[in-house]
Image: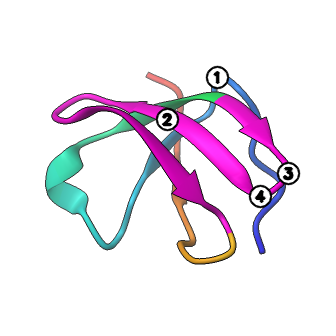
Amino acid sequence: MQYDLEPGNFVINPLKRDWGIGQIQSVIKNKATINFSNVGKQVINLDNIKLEKVSNE
């Protein structure tokens, strides 16, 4: 479980690196809505995928 994420953080999905860098739009319970540079908005279940934080650009 990964609940240290908040809106505005930049992340990478390590299972889908080709999605590019994403910016978190919202986090509700275990679901994060993230706008990725290459695929647009995705909803990620934080119980299943450990996102990697990257420094804000």
* Residue nearest the observer in this picture, 20 or 31: 31
**Nearest-to-viewer mark from 4 and 1:** 4
| Label 2 SS | strand
- Residue 23 lies in the magenta stretch: no
Q: Which residue is mark 4?
A: 30
Report which quarter residue 27 is drawn in: top right
The amino acid marked with disc number 3 is Lys
- Residue at figure coordinates x 39%, y 60% from the top left: 13
> Who comes first in sequence, dot 2 or dot 3?
3
In the rendered image, residue 24, in percent from the top left (x then y), is placed at 58, 32
Could you tell me residue 22's position as x and y percent? 40, 36
What is the C-alpha distance between the residues marked 4 and 3? Answer: 4 Å
> Which numbered dot is residue 8?
1
Which residue lies at the image location 75% right of the left edge and 46% below the top edge? 5
Mark 4–mark 1 CB contact (< 8 Å): no
- Kind of residue at disc 4: Asn
Q: CA distance from mark 4 to mark 1?
A: 17 Å
Q: Are marks 1 and 3 in contact (CB under 8 Å)?
A: no
Task: Determine whether label 4 and label 3 are within 8 Å by CB.
Answer: yes
Position of 29 with respect to 20 (left or right) is: right
Q: Is residue 30 magenta?
A: yes
Circle 3 sits on which residue?
Answer: 29
Let me know if residue 54 appears in the view. Answer: yes
Image spot of residue 51 (x, y percent)? 53, 62
- Name the one closer to the observer, 52 or 36: 36
| Residue interval drawn in magenta | 26-46
| Residue type, mark 1 in image | Gly
Q: Check whether the beta carbons of the residues at disc 1 and disc 2 lie within 8 A of each other.
A: no
- At horizontal 33% and vertical 39% (from top left) the residue drawn is 21
